[in-house]
Image (cartoon, helix red, strand yellow):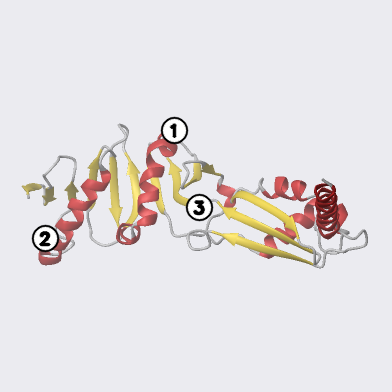
Amino acid sequence: MIKRILLSLVLLLVIAYLVVAVTTFNREPSNLICSDMELIIKDTVNAGFITKQEITDLLKQKGIYPVGENMERIRTKILEEELDKHPLIDKTECYKTPSGRLCIEITQRVPVLQIMSNNGDEYYIDNKGTIIPPEAKCIAHLAIVTGYVEKSFAMRDLHKFGVFLQQNEFWNAQIEQINVLPGHEIELIPRVGNHIVYLGKIDNFEEKLSRLKIFYEKALNRVGWNKYSRISMEFNNQIICTKNNTAHIQ
């Protein structure tokens, strides 16, 4: 019985010691000054627009730049809220280190299409289907979308096409412009070849582009990339090519 009591007391003392030790370790000394700001930027392969200098300038402008400040006075939640307002930032996480450094982890928004609608709207669409304002000035190589582009259509349907382009090396390099017709039919203007690709409705675009790539490889590589002025992929299992106002069914 006495042994159990002693063991219980020892266990309680050990637990109390660990709690005090952990609390003491995590507590910042009252005079600890932030010596550096470490910036970790994710998605640099597909985005890579945000720099440490830009973040530094933004935090200085807001009066919340942490370097040189007392660590106890730095509010990471406020830093996160301000940085999340940046048009190219999707999410921010800030945390302090015991050595007096502030770490900022930034997940960027990844633009996939640049919209230049004939109604005057100009903006970017990211890989989640949300709008990035034009002042973000994305510098990535993006296909430009023109024509009758409503924001709802861009966010719901076109963004899926943009994600496909981003993930497909061949089509991302080949497609320069996407033109939206009044009925939401799609025309593609390629970088290589003097022709327009008519997809029709955007439904099943992956299957249509798969057939088009085979046609490129087996036909255009043989007869020349400038032979046709229009290639229609509208109908299943059929490619209609237009040359000198004459239609040929392949």
Foreground pick, 17 / 64: 17
Is residue 230 shown above or below 192?
A: above
Residue 90 image offset from top left, x and y in percent: 58, 48
Q: Is residue 46 visible?
A: yes
Cα–Cα span, label 2 and label 3:
35 Å
Is residue 153 shown above or below 110?
A: above
Q: Quarter-wise, where is residue 42 in the image?
A: bottom right
Foreground pick, 180 / 22: 22
Q: Earlier in the sequence, mark 1 or mark 3?
A: 3
Q: Quarter-wise, where is residue 194 in the image?
A: bottom left
Q: Amino acid at mark 1?
A: Ser
Q: Amino acid at mark 3?
A: Val
Disc 1 designates what residue? Answer: 152
Disc 3 designates what residue? Answer: 110
- Which residue is rendered at x = 88% and y = 63% of the image? 32
Disc 2 designates what residue? Answer: 219
Q: Amino acid at mark 2?
A: Ala
Residue at the right extreme, as displayed: 31
Foreground pick, 46 / 54: 46
- Which residue is rendered at x = 46% and y = 41% of the image? 129
